[in-house]
Image: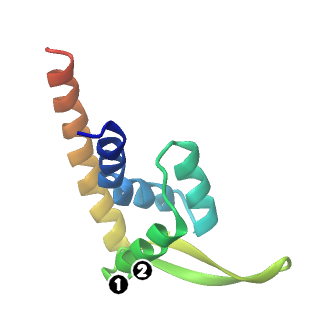
Amino acid sequence: MNLENTQVQMRKGVLEFCILSIISRGEVYASDMLEELTNAKIMVVEGTLYPLLTRLRKAGLVDYKWVESIAGPPRKYYTLTHIGREFLSGLQGTWNELVSSTNRIANHQ
């Protein structure tokens, strides 16, 4: 078994939750999401992020608006919809339970 592959798979498993969490704080540009994810050691590339954002938009969880930029083409800024906030709330509960259970098992409590 390859440790690095398992670590990548674990990170991918929480990617949607992390992206929705980032967007929940306010309007955000995709490159800012990439930077935050990378800084948190959740490695993701544009080729992964943009299809995921499209899937989240089609599911009604996120929306976007175009904002003109002085430094180049317009930028697409993402926000959570009402449905997205409810969905994220459900994920947060599941995440909290998963972290608690995992810590109990990993720490033999």
**Residue situated furthest right in the rendering:** 70
Q: Is the C terminus in the top left, top right, bottom left or bottom right quadrant? A: top left
* Total marks in image: 2
Q: Position of residue 107 (x, y in %)?
A: 21, 16
Question: Which numbered circle lies on residue 54?
Answer: 2
Q: Is the N terminus in the top left, top right, bottom left or bottom right quadrant? A: top left
The picture quadrant where one finds residue 71 is bottom right
In the rendered view, would you say 91 is above or below 3? below
Callout 1 secondary element = helix
In the rendered view, would you say 38 is above or below 34? above
Using residue 24 as the reference point, say whether residue 105 is left or right of it. left
The picture quadrant where one finds residue 74 is bottom right
The colour style of the image is: rainbow
Tell me which amino acid carries mark 2.
Answer: Thr
In the rendered view, would you say 7 is above or below 65? above
Q: Position of residue 30 (x, y in %)?
A: 58, 68
Residue 29 visible to the viewer:
no
Residue 17 visible to the viewer:
yes
**Residue at (34% x, 41% y) in the render:** 7
- Between residues 91 and 2, which one lies in front from this camera angle? 2
In the rendered view, would you say 77 is above or below 40? below
Query: Would you say the residues marked 2 and 1 are in contact, meaning their CB atoms lie under 8 Å apart?
Result: yes
**Residue at (49% x, 62% y) in the render:** 23
Determine crowd level at label 1: few under 14, some 14-19, many 20+ residues with C-alpha closer than 10 A: few
Tell me which amino acid carries mark 1.
Answer: Lys
Disc 1 marks which residue? 58
**Residue at (42% x, 77% y) in the render:** 51
Q: Position of residue 41 (x, y in %)?
A: 50, 42
Q: Position of residue 54 (x, y in %)?
A: 42, 80
Callout 2 secondary element = helix
